[in-house]
């Protein structure tokens, strides 16, 4: 009987390890690309989804939930060790939707964490929407990654999604020693509704309760960096009606649903108005807020008078007003509007932004804001936002 040629076990291990190291080096290189002008093809551009846009003067687009930095789902990571998290479907709260996945970066020290919060209009989406490409690049740079689920407004109106995300941040901080997390370096990024939640967490006063017997509740909800794609800085239909150039964005059907209202008239009642103002991130801006990187795929053009509400829900006016408010208090706010020639992007991608902010030791020391009972300085002059 003819003998079969076999590869020694040690050789197989060496080959597999060589492939893993090569992939890690390649991913890390992608995180440290130099700056590129808008007219130059950047190395990561081939990973972006192609967004179908109309060519009309209104600059509207056909896709309703835009995640500018998401990649084609067919592009799966080649390394199977990076496909599943170190911790999967971990419960961070009392509700069934309060689950998260966690990937630990291979570092000798405590690692920063970038938390992905999915979009979906607060009624859909899943933590599995996290781009494999982004996850690999962050891990290769030494940043651990978490992805969370949260309750939807179809069953649990505001503030449920916001409080769930805050609880997830607290849970991760509480796991600091066990999961080798640096509690002073936690950022969050997301698209659409996920971006809105990131903005709210970043600007809102700390939700920590220093008197609680629950160690999770005693932990801070403050962020050190925010990545936002198509995010809403306000969830106030009256604010949208005031500032938006045309269209009917203020009539988006999810707005009454957020506040358990049956119609738009009910949104104007005093108890609901108080909640609406509380849920709008722009109302909580202060000089102590973390830097934010905002991307909008839609052009900054007026909307047609008969445009459906969904056409404006990712309009860059949300980012323009947020940047104005943050500029006034001296907080870094990068606004990237795709297809706008004057747009300047100093980072090139959300990964580069998060890597810059979460790995800089001097930045983390000056912006950790993790003390329980953290006091915020409010901006009272909000009428022009």
Image (cartoon, rainbow, N blue to C red):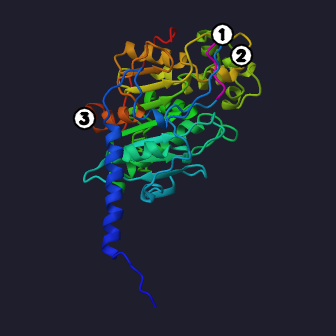
Within 10 Å of the Cα at label 2, are there few (<14), some (14-19), or many (20+) other Cα atoms?
A: some
Q: CA distance from mark 3 to mark 1?
A: 44 Å
Q: Which residue is mark 3?
A: 365
Answer with mark 3 or mark 1, whichever residue precedes in sequence. 1
Secondary structure under tag 3 reads helix
Q: Tell me whether circle 2 and circle 1 mark residues in contact (CB < 8 Å).
A: yes
Q: CA distance from mark 2 to mark 3?
A: 47 Å
Q: Is residue 324 magenta-colored?
A: no
Q: Which residue is mark 2?
A: 307
- Nearer the camera: disc 2 or disc 3: 2
Q: CA distance from mark 2 to mark 1?
A: 8 Å
Q: Tell me whether circle 2 and circle 3 mark residues in contact (CB < 8 Å).
A: no
Tell how many labels.
Answer: 3
Q: Residue furthest front?
A: 2
Within 10 Å of the Cα at label 3, are there few (<14), some (14-19), or many (20+) other Cα atoms?
A: few
Question: Residue 228 vs residue 97: left or right?
Answer: left
**Residue 15 location in percent, x, y?**
33, 64
Secondary structure under tag 2 reads loop
Q: Residue furthest bottom?
A: 1
Residue 380, by quadrant, is top left
Q: Is residue 161 above or below residue 238?
A: below
Within 10 Å of the Cα at label 1, are there few (<14), some (14-19), or many (20+) other Cα atoms?
A: some
Residue 114, by quadrant, is top left
Answer with mark 2 or mark 1, whichever residue precedes in sequence. 1
The reply to whether residue 175 is visible in this rendering is yes
Residue at 35%, 39% (x, y): give it: 30
Which region of the structure is painted magenta? 58-63
Q: Which residue is mark 1?
A: 246
């Amino acid at each position: 009987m003819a003998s079969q040629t076999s590869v020694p076990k040690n050789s197989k291990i060496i080959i597999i390890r060589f492939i893993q190291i090569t992939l890690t080096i390649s991913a890390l290189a992608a995180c440290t690309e130099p700056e590129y002008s808008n007219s130059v093809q950047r190395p990561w551009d081939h990973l972006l989804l192609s967004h179908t846009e109309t060519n009309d003067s209104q600059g509207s687009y056909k896709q309703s939930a835009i995640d500018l930095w998401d990649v084609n789902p067919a592009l799966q990571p080649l390394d199977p060790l990076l496909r599943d998290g170190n911790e999967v479907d971990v419960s961070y709260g009392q509700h069934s939707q309060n689950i998260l996945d966690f990937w630990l970066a291979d570092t000798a020290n405590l690692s920063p964490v970038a938390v992905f919060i999915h979009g979906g209009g607060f009624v859909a989406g899943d933590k599995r929407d996290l781009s494999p490409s982004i996850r690999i690049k962050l891990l290769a740079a030494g940043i651990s990654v978490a992805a969370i689920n949260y309750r939807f407004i179809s069953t649990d109106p505001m503030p449920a999604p916001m409080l769930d995300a805050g609880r997830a941040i607290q849970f991760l901080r509480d796991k600091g020693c066990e999961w080798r997390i640096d509690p002073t370096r936690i950022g969050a990024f997301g698209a659409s509704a996920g971006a809105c939640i990131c903005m709210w967490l970043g600007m809102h006063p700390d939700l920590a309760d220093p008197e609680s017997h629950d160690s999770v509740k005693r932990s801070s909800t403050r962020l050190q960096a925010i990545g936002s794609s198509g995010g809403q800085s306000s969830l106030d239909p009256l604010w949208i009606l005031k500032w938006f150039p045309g269209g009917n964005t203020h009539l988006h059907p999810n707005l009454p649903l957020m506040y358990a209202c049956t119609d738009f008239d009910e949104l104007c009642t005093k108890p609901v108005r108080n909640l609406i103002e509380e849920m709008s991130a722009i109302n909580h801006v202060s000089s102590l807020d973390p830097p934010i990187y905002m991307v909008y795929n839609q052009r900054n053009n007026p909307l047609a008078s008969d445009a459906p509400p969904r056409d404006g829900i990712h309009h860059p006016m949300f980012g323009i007003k947020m940047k104005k408010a943050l500029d006034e208090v001296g907080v870094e706010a990068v606004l990237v509007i795709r297809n706008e020639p004057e747009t300047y992007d100093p980072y090139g991608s959300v990964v580069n932004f998060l890597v810059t902010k979460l790995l800089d030791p001097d930045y983390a020391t000056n912006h950790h804001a993790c003390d329980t009972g953290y006091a915020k300085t409010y901006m009272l002059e909000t009428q022009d936002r």
